[in-house]
Image (spheres, grey):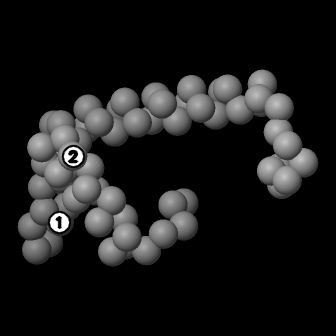
Amino acid sequence: MLHMSQPTLSQIVRRLEDAFGIALLTRTTRSVRLTPNGRMFLGEARAVLERFDAAMPSVPRPVWWGG
């Protein structure tokens, strides 16, 4: 779950597309689909998040972290 509104997520995706100069999604009035570049980016993003999750247990957390 992303815990953000659809308009916020749409803004983030558009900013990524603008920053990379590529379309990540193909949008029509009836659907939204990943482009080939979007599929590649999604795979890389998932790999980064998996590495982040794997690294977290080894990082000391300050008391204020809450976890």
Foreground residue among 28 and 66: 66
The answer to which quarter of the image holds residue 37 is top left
Pointer 1: residues within 10 angstroms few (<14), some, or many (20+)? few
Foreground residue among 15 and 51: 15
Foreground residue among 11 and 46: 11
Q: Tell me residue 33's x, y (percent).
A: 19, 54
Would residue 31 be found to the left or right of residue 51 on screen?
A: left
CB-based contact (under 8 Å), mark 1 and mark 2: no
Q: CA distance from mark 1 to mark 2?
A: 23 Å
Pointer 2: residues within 10 angstroms few (<14), some, or many (20+)? few
Would residue 64 be found to the left or right of residue 45 on screen?
A: right
Q: Is disc 1 placed on a helix, strand or loop?
A: loop
- At x 15%, y 37%, the residue is 36
Q: Disc 1 designates what residue?
A: 31
Residue 17 vs 7, above or below: the answer is above
Q: Is residue 21 visible?
A: yes
- At x 25%, y 56%, the residue is 15
Q: Is disc 2 placed on a helix, strand or loop?
A: helix
Residue 52 vs 35, above or below: the answer is above
Q: Is residue 34 visible?
A: no
Q: Tell me residue 28's x, y (percent).
A: 9, 67
Q: Disc 2 designates what residue?
A: 19
